[in-house]
Amino acid sequence: RGLTLYAALGAQSARMVQRVTYRRRKSFNTKSNKIRKVKTPGGKTAVQYLAKKPKGVMCGDCHKRLQGIPALRPKEYARLPRRQKTVTRAYGGSRCGKCVRQRIVRAFLVEEQKIVKKVLKNQAAGAKA
């Protein structure tokens, strides 16, 4: 009976995951040191290093993802042509369309307010004279 239990434990340890070692200098499980264990055709378990997942470009005002610009790591943006990094519009590649529209409307309303103030001031000056 004891022998069968030992044999069962031996079979279980044979099915255990094969240990692997890091291939680079950093020996801690950090964000930049993520790995995937892969079986080679020879039956060994090897290590593949995973690249960080890109977040994509965010709008500076509302912090939502910008459409039309691919989500890449910063170094990959350097290799991209300019037309793929931006959108052809004011603040393209920096602000989303909604926020640009808001900025334009806000600027227009501020200018209108200045004109109204000037007109009221002129009317008040004309009433005194």
Image (cartoon, helix red, strand yellow):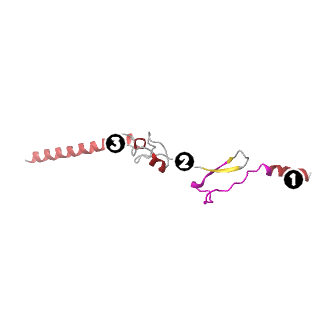
- Answer with left or right where residue 112 lies relative to residue 81: left
**Residue at 64%, 56% in the rendered image:** 23
* Magenta-colored span: 13-37
Label 3 close to label 2 by CB (< 8 Å): no
Q: Secondary structure at mark 2?
A: loop
Report which residue position mark 3 lands on: 90
Residue 102 in the image: state x and y as whole percent. 34, 42
Report which residue position mark 2 lands on: 53
Magenta span: predominant SS is loop
Mark 3 neighbour density, 10 Å: few (under 14) some (14–19) many (20 or more) = few
- Answer with left or right where residue 39 lies relative to residue 93: right
Kind of residue at badge 1: Tyr
Q: If you read the primary sequence from the N terminus, does the residue marked by circle 3 or circle 1 appear first?
A: 1
Residue 73 in the image: state x and y as whole percent. 50, 49
Q: CA distance from mark 2 to mark 1?
A: 45 Å
Q: Quadrant of residue 82?
A: top left
Reply yes or no: does residue 41 show up in magenta: no
Which labelled disc corresponds to residue 6?
Answer: 1
Label 3 close to label 1 by CB (< 8 Å): no
Q: CA distance from mark 3 to mark 2?
A: 29 Å
Q: Nearer the viewer, residue 32 or 46?
A: 46
**Residue at 82%, 49% in the rendered image:** 11
Q: Nearer the viewer, residue 11 or 123?
A: 11
Q: Secondary structure at mark 3?
A: loop
